[in-house]
Image: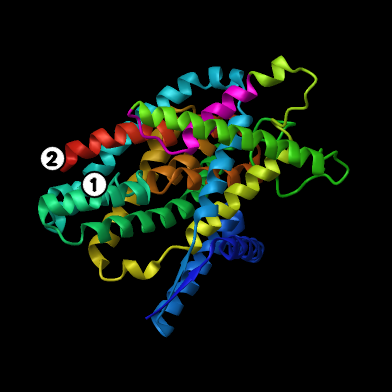
Amino acid sequence: MQQILIPAFPAITIGIIVFFLGAFLTRKIGFLRNYSIPEPVSGGLAAAVITWMLFSWFQIEVTFDLVVRDTLLVIFFATIGLNARLSDLIAGGKLLGLLLVVTVAFIILQNGVGLIGAWLFDLPNAVSVLLGSASLIGGHGTAIAWGPTIENQTGFAAADEIGIASATLGLVCAALVGGPVAKYLIDRNALVARDYDEPVVGMPHKIDETEDRDIDHISIMRTMLAANVAVILGYIANIFIAQAGLKLPLFVPCLIVAIIMSNTIPYIFREMKWPARTRALAVVSDYCLSIFLAMSLMSMQLWTLSGLGTTLLVVLVMQVVVAVLLIIFVFFRLIGSDYTAAVLSAGFAGFTLGATPTAIANMSAVTKRYGQAPLAFIVLPLVSAFFVDLANAFIIRFFVGL
């Protein structure tokens, strides 16, 4: 077996190429376009298939240095925070609480489905979380963290492999399900987005050529400066948070710091041109998210799924069916049955089966096609990137102890 490690700079360059591959596929394939499949998803999956073929046919294992990818994620969440307005946060207070309650209930349901799968295939009960929220809502990081613990507790030697494989397949499902779910809800209920003059995340596919786009090198540099300051302050805040005994992903304090900055600095320095809700910020945000997701999907090692076969496939199908039914018949109605609820439904599918960036990419793809939903991009990251990690940890411990 020949192993090839792609260093960080070529890896991000390949990520950009993969994004354009996805954009090409989206233009040429009606399904991808009509059902709002994000360009980096289609391109990333195509690249992952190519590396799979290299592994299977030529015994070449390709891996990527993803350190730049992780930096892009942090900058992206800083741009989300810079767009947040206090009025939006106040308006979204009730929605935020409702989304949190539904998510906690879904974590329990997801592990219940995993427990049924463990019973069906005669696996230890504790493995249920690796077929449930540890791998799906928790993602690769949580699955890797819990795999050794469950292996030591149960003696189930494939715990690590089944957790990583479940997280990988879940990420793929999350990226493919969100857009179609949102399209179904929008079309069935004839939902229409409100008119917003200011972009939030990403640029629409079609822009009036006569429109003042408010983009030049100064606006881009202003945006990057604000985002970088938010990241630096978020990094410092995260040090103190860790010392207090609370472990959070770095992008969470960066998001919170950016929200504070965007709701204080423009009011203190009124003559300053703040980048919130500008097209320059939308472009930077779209770039960071698109390349992050393209790199995440192109780096998936699909060959690690072989050998886990029927068990994993059956349980993942169960999880996807349960998630889609819950979103359409319960989640969408509970949170308002409006256009924002439909966009949040795409995001909910993204992070309950995959990860927060997948959720944002799903929502971004939907809003590019149908119109903006600013509140969705504020409340969902706060729930999926902060509160859910805490709730998931407690629920996982309960199911592991069964």
Residue at (65, 63) in percent of width and height: 20
> Dot 1, crowdedness within 10 Å: few (<14), some or many (≥20)?
many
Label placed on residue 367:
none
Q: Residue 401 has which mark?
A: 2
Position above or below: 24 against 232 = below
The C terminus lies in quadrant: top left
Give the overall secondary structure of the magenta segment. helix
Q: Residue at x 28, y 48 (%)?
A: 145
Q: Quadrant of residue 387?
A: top left
Q: Position of residue 345 (x, y in %)?
A: 47, 39
For the residue pair 122 and 355, the one nearer the viewer reads as 355
Q: Earlier in the sequence, mark 2 or mark 1?
A: 1
Q: Is residue 300 left or right of residue 146?
A: right
Determine the residue positioned at 66% across, 65% down. Answer: 24
SS of the residue under disc 1: helix
Furthest toward the bottom, the residue is 58
In the rendering, which numbered label is found on residue 129?
A: 1
Q: CA distance from mark 2 to mark 1?
A: 11 Å
Left/right placement of residue 207 relative to residue 389 reads right
Task: Characterize the local packing of mark 2: few (<14), some (14-19) or many (20 or more) Cα atoms within 10 angstroms.
Answer: few
Badges 2 and 1: C-beta atoms under 8 Å apart?
no
The percent coordinates of residue 164 (x first, y second) are 32, 57
At label 1, which amino acid type do we have?
Answer: Val
- In the foreground, 30 or 129: 129
> Which image quadrant is residue 40 in?
bottom right
Residue sitting at the far right: 210
Query: What amino acid is labelled 2 in the image?
Result: Gly
Q: x and y percent of residue 65 in the render? A: 49, 61
Q: Secondary structure at mark 2?
A: loop
- Magenta stretch, residue numbers: 245-263
Return the residue nearer the eye: 102 or 259: 259
**Which residue appears at 78% of the width and 27% of the height?**
273
